[in-house]
Amino acid sequence: MSDLSDLYQEIIIDHCKRPRNFGALGPPARVAEGYNPLCGDQVKVYVSLDGDRVASVRFEGSGCAISTASASLMTEAVGGRTVAEARALFDDVHSMLVGDPSVVAEDTEHLGKLAALAGVREYPMRVKCATLAWHTLQSALAGSADGPAAPVSTE
């Protein structure tokens, strides 16, 4: 295995065993729930905004190592960003996982630790595990603090 691949594996394992930003946020956080019926991954994403900036983002749930690590990495990456930047980061990560491989290989450096998820694309059944938290984040950002957003399913 290459040194880069080893590093990516270490990042995934670390974020799975010690997820960052795990736990609920109280009101008036925006909340969305996601579910992957193929493997049973479940995630709830909480987002607190300060104007147009993500003041805090946390998650709860249970799932495989990829799902948990992806949610943990996501919370670290989007905290402090504007909503537009968080949505653009979703687009970049989604493209990395499902986009044209020739373009993806050249354009992951700006993703930092999130590039550790790139290896998931080699296992198509696991891509939904890696994107569940991200789709759920999108739903939370589109929702309001008045109640949970519509549930997200990766069917």
Image (cartoon, rainbow, N blue to C red):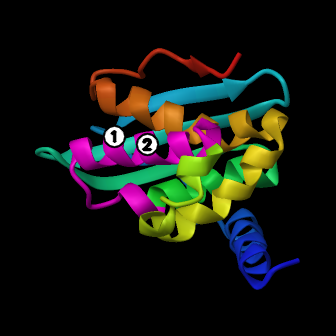
Q: Mark yes or no: residue 67 visible.
A: yes
Quarter of the picture holding the N terminus: bottom right
- Please give the name of the residue rendered at 32% of the width and 33% of the height, measured from the top-left corner: 141
- Please give the name of the residue rendered at 41% of the width and 32% of the height, measured from the top-left corner: 138
Position of residue 22 in the picture relative to residue 119 (left or right): left
Magenta stretch holds residue 40: no
Q: Residue furthest front?
A: 102
**Rendered location of residue 12, percent (x, y):** 72, 66
Amino acid type, mark 2: Phe
Q: Residue furthest right?
A: 1
Position of residue 51 in the picture relative to residue 76 (left or right): left
Task: Reply above or below: 38 against 7.
Answer: above
Q: Residues within 10 Å of mark 2 (few under 14, many from 20)?
A: some
**Rendered location of residue 114, percent (x, y):** 55, 62
Position of residue 62 in the picture relative to residue 132 (left or right): right
Main SS class of the magenta portion in the image: helix
- Give the distance between the C-alpha atoms of the residues marked 1 and 2, in whole angstroms: 5 Å
* Badge 1 vs badge 2, beta-carbon distance below 8 Å: yes
Residue closer to the observer: 43 or 24: 43
**Rendered location of residue 98, percent (x, y):** 62, 36
Residue closer to the observer: 152 or 104: 104
In this figure, which residue is indicated by the disc labeled 2?
Answer: 90
Q: Mark yes or no: residue 22 visible.
A: no
**Rendered location of residue 14, percent (x, y):** 72, 74
Instruction: Choose top left, top right, bottom left or bottom right for residue 3.
Output: bottom right
Position of residue 18 in the picture relative to residue 9 (left or right): left
Q: Which residues are magenta?
A: 76-100
Amino acid type, mark 1: Arg
- Please give the name of the residue rendered at 75% of the width and 77% of the height, measured from the top-left corner: 10
Instruction: Choose top left, top right, bottom left or bottom right for residue 33.
Output: top right
User: Residue 87: which numbered mark, if any?
Assistant: 1
